[in-house]
Image (cartoon, grey):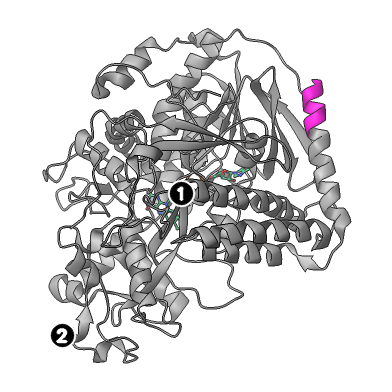
Amino acid sequence: MKLDAKIPGGPIAQKWDRHRFELKLVNPANKRKYEIIVVGTGLAGGSASASLAELGYNVKTFCIQDSPRRAHSIAAQGGINASKNYQNDGDSDWRLFYDTVKGGDFRAREANVYRLAQLSGNIIDQCVAQGVPFAREYGGQLANRSFGGAQVSRTFYARGQTGQQLLLGAYSALSRQIAAGKVKMFPRREMLDVVVVDGKARGIIARNLVTGEIEKYAADAVVLSTGGYGNVFFLSTNAMASNVTAAYRAYKRGALFANPCFTQIHPTCIPVHGTYQSKLTLMSESLRNDGRVWVPKKTGDRRPPSQIPESERDYYLENKYPSFGNLVPRDVASRNAKEQCDMKKGVGETGLAVYLDFADAIKRDGKDVIAKKYGNLFQMYEKITAQNPYETPMMIYPAVHYTMGGLWVDYNLMSTIDGLFVLGEANFSDHGANRLGASALMQGLADGYFIIPYTIGGYLAANSKKEISSDHPAFRESSAGVESGASKLLSIKGKRTVDDFHRQLGNILWEYCGMSRNDEGLKKAVKLIQELRGEFWENVLVPGSEKDLNQSLEKAGRVADFLEFGELMVMDALSRRESCGGHFNEAFQTEENEAKRDDDNFCHVSAWEYTGEGKEPALHKEQLVFENVKLTQRSYK
Ligand SMILES: Cc1cc2nc3c(=O)[nH]c(=O)nc-3n(C[C@H](O)[C@H](O)[C@H](O)COP(=O)(O)OP(=O)(O)OC[C@H]3O[C@@H](n4cnc5c(N)ncnc54)[C@H](O)[C@@H]3O)c2cc1C
């Protein structure tokens, strides 16, 4: 298979305009004749549904939660990037583009990233028009703060609740279309298969999570915006319902999966505190604007932080990376925290934590100013740890947070299945091997508000419209497969719970395919995952019935997919014989322990094709061409 990214020609700054002009249009009267399915109502899916319906298409929208506004996007805290240059500090589309390509360790597609930077300002305008209450300066101008991997302040925010406010904006636009009858909303539905007819995505099979019924829906195109798969690690900062199922089942139907091993481990999370914990909590990267990261200089120093004098503290990020200091990108900050803990300088009961200290900022700006910026985050921290971060430093440690990998898409955001588009965290597109903070919200909303409305029209206009009904044999075959999958899970009646398997899978991946990897560990992980998967299908206990609300069954299906997908992640990690961004193979590092890329042999996207049950997936490569940015060793010193 030859992967064609369909990148338009011409200078990078003109590609998107030119492409929009060249894309065929669907006339307004004809738009009313098309049915589009959107799966997911996070920022990507919510904005896509609203925008497509506003254009006149008939949209059916699906989500797992009981309300579209409970999608995982609601959890986003710190902010959203845009190159408005309100601070007059040297920002531009070009700088945002450059920072993002460099931040992703030169493993993203230039043309997509430039378009993202170009659209970033429109997103802020759109959201302000919807009433999103972004933080403002005294004079009324929108405020900005800094995020990792950038030396300008370009992050727009609404306290520590930016995702929630942006989602309420998208949700209100969506609700308007629901009321207008242009969007039909299907909450509490889980998409379990994509239906492909004559090589084109023509619908989905979904389970009604309340009644257990298997439902079939036909359409002219399908848009997946089903989020990231960080929960494959069991412990992550993702919402409990985040999963890989929709993307993985599309993969099994012919959509290629790109860079599955590129996982983001976020440096500032509340450390793990026990074996039976089910969730990890993020402390937003925005805190690194004012918080200073340090560990005791002496190994094994057990004194409380207040008793460790300045001269005995190591502000290791500030010392090692004087230009970016505490605001180095996430992969760099995470690896350095691990390094300090590996050297036995970690703090707290487990020794797996470093300090994030606000004492200097409070002394400088006063408690009120700090509370205004981060009050809800400080409160959340105190509720979970029973420690007051105004008085004692926070303790933080890296945790799984985001997945840069996802379904492969071309410049139009279409997967390798015609008519199947993929938006937001579910695609692999713009962040390369490491995402910069505040760029996920930007990408999800660019995809939903500003890209898919054009590119889906181009697809529909270029293909003659063929009617299809959900009685087509392909729908019957798909739905029978989904039903038998559920029956099989229920029939096993083993002894171990789904969570037990999931936790063990997460431990394997964290240990061998987490913050740093080596060949021996990765090979061991393949074997362990295969054994665990074998045991799962013989010994999992899924109580209840498929004809009812059954959360164990829901989870079992997701964990069954994770157990296959986890192996794909490890294979991807094994095949990439370099280190880059979030993929750190210990065999490939510079003398200063930074990731060492191999641009001659690995400057490509790895896209995996499903070849059948029990068979090795086939690897395809999209060569990345850099015409505007020079490939260099990333430096934040
Ligand atoms: C704690 C936290 C804080 C973050 N803070 C920031 C931040 O400050 N800035 C930033 O840029 N990024 C941040 N991120 C990342 C960002 O929030 C996500 O990448 C982004 O919100 C993903 O949006 P999405 O629309 O792609 O998917 P999601 O918001 O995950 O939505 C997925 C949707 O798909 C639905 N779905 C999934 N599977 C199925 C299925 N099989 N059938 C039907 N529906 C399905 C779900 O119900 C949901 O509606 C943060 C992430 C976390 C975890």
Where is residue 113 drawn, in percent x and y? 33, 34
312 relative to 243, above or below = below
* Three-letter amino acid code at the position of disc 2: Ser
SS of the residue under disc 1: loop
**Residue receiving disc 1:** 262
**Residue receiving disc 2:** 311
Where is residue 228 drawn, in percent x and y? 52, 47
Q: Is residue 533 magenta?
A: no
How crowded pointer 1 is (Cα within 10 Å; few <14, some 14-19, many 20+) is rated as many
Can residue 379 be seen here? no
Give the main secondary structure of the magenta stretch: helix
480 relative to 209, above or below = above
- Is 479 positioned to the left or the right of 621 in the image? right
Q: How many marks?
A: 2
> Which mark is in front, 2 or 1?
1
SS of the residue under disc 2: helix
Q: Is residue 476 magenta?
A: yes
Task: Please report whichever mark, 2 or 1, sits nearer to the chain's N-terminal start.
Answer: 1
Q: CA distance from mark 2 to mark 1?
A: 38 Å
Where is residue 600 drawn, in percent x and y? 34, 38
* Three-letter amino acid code at the position of disc 1: Phe
State yes or no: discs 2 and 1 in contact (Cβ < 8 Å): no
Q: Residue at x 56, y 41 (%)?
A: 226
Where is residue 337 drawn, in percent x and y? 34, 69
Magenta highlight range:
471-478
- Label 1 within 8 A of ligand 1 by Cβ: no
